[in-house]
Amino acid sequence: MANRIKSKLGSESKGLILSESMQGEVCPDSLDDLIGDFIRTPYRPEDPSSHKYLKKCWILFKRDYELQQIQNQDGTLCAHYPPIILIPERERPRKTCPEEGTELSSTKSLERTLCKDTDFDGWVHLEMGRSDRIRSLDDTYFEHRIFPPVEEQKNGVAVNNPVPESRVNELTQLFQTARFARARSRFAVPVLIYKGKNLCRGATLSVGAEQLGRRGWDLFSTGGEGVVEDGASNLPDRSRLGRQEDLCDRVRGQDVKLLKELRVRIICDLMYQQKRLKFFMPVASSEKVDKAGRYREFHLASMPYPGCESFRGYQSKELNSDKLKFNWKGSKVDATLQIPDAVLPKSLGVEWERYTEWSIRELTSNYIRFLLYQMDNLEGGVFLHCISGWDRTPMVISLLRLSLWADELVHVSLNPLEMLFFTIAYDWRLFGHKLNERHAKCEEIFYFGMDFTQYMTGSEFSIHCGLQKMESGSECMKTREYKLAEVRRLFMDSYYNIIIPKCIKLSHLT
């Protein structure tokens, strides 16, 4: 069984292959199929449906971003991540060439202009009236790469060659070594790049028992031939398996190394517990209570947010999100809102000390605005997680992506249907959200997240307006309002076509 992991992770693995010839067309039926599969079947990386949706996501993602592919066939790295993890390296160069005097004629029917970009092998769809917001090729939006390509001299001119496979394998090996530090091996993964900074997602920290179990299984299944790092086996020596503190120090050290490699500056923790307990035993922990202080080089923001159980019956009972409250005095709640002064945005005008008085809608609004501020102003990336990273985390990631897209700052070539399909497929399903289980329990956090888009149309969510409340009426705000309204309309149409008839059928059976 020697070198089994290497053969799985290396470039020679015969897993899913994403090629330029694939078709990524998205139509309303595609969205219905996606939500239908989502509600019927749990996510598994090896399922054909997972491959189908990943292929479409790859086509949509690569329109605007240069991507690297990390093989995770059959869940080799993580059983709850996509079969191929798509790493955005940088935004593709884009230009616009609107005719002189053209304006956005209607928020109901956005006119488009096609512009052939010689630096991009495809047609880019850009909204009219936004040339003042298109960035030049010298902008820092295009400078960041996780692994910069090798620069060579050809005829006296510097040329950036494609990223060598060996450097992709370096990142793969870093994922492999760092995954044991996170619950369910859900290591930090960059899912969006904005202004050269990564937005990353993952799970909270695992504790000794899980680390020991996963590393022991890895040792058994590979015959001790793990990924080699720094000339030594990356797996613990058999004589040291019982030394949980030493093992914890090693795996969390690799986690810190990965976060630094991804240029993360702030870690935002959505857990409302300091430690996750099951049967009175800790099964997960948080960076903020790491006794050794391994994460002291990062800004640690404790942003407790209600779990999926708090959204029970939200849609089926037609609850008002403004009246939806969380019980901050619950016996399991021991985390408090704590944001370091160095990253506390005074300009947002939020009275953070009153967070326990907010409704879940207001809490969500203020958290989204805070994270948008960090992504726009912080010198470094953002890492976001809850416990397992598949309920609260995808909701927040999806809302951040949609907000930046509505501002025409990310995924600029995607229309509302394509953007909605991408965020549901990639942010939710392919990263392991269990909609079938949540829906059976009426824990409707997925519905809440999509429904919340109606509250993000205002200028206080817009980067262009400095996240400040202003009067609407500008062209960029009309575009934003249209895009988010269209996303919500498309979602509701599909959701009620697929989900509601199923609920009615189930109610008759019971």
Image (cartoon, helix red, strand yellow):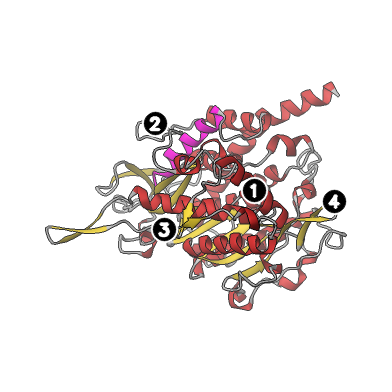
Q: Which residues are magenta?
A: 48-64
Q: Secondary structure at mark 4?
A: loop
The first of marks 4 and 3 along the sequence is 3
Label 4 sits on what residue type? Answer: Phe
Height in image: 308 above or below 304? above
Q: Which residue is mark 1?
A: 216
Q: Which residue is mark 3?
A: 146
Label 1 sits on what residue type? Answer: Gly
Height in image: 222 above or below 153? above
Distance from the alpha carbon under mark 2 to that under mark 4: 48 Å
Nearer to the camera, 297 or 102: 297
How far from the left and from the top, in percent, is residue 239? 64, 56
Check residue 335 for magenta coloring: no
The first of marks 1 and 4 along the sequence is 1
The first of marks 2 and 1 along the sequence is 2
Whether the residues at callouts 2 and 4 have beta carbons within 8 Å, the answer is: no
Height in image: 269 above or below 122? below
Distance from the alpha carbon under mark 2 to that under mark 1: 40 Å
Distance from the alpha carbon under mark 2 to that under mark 3: 26 Å
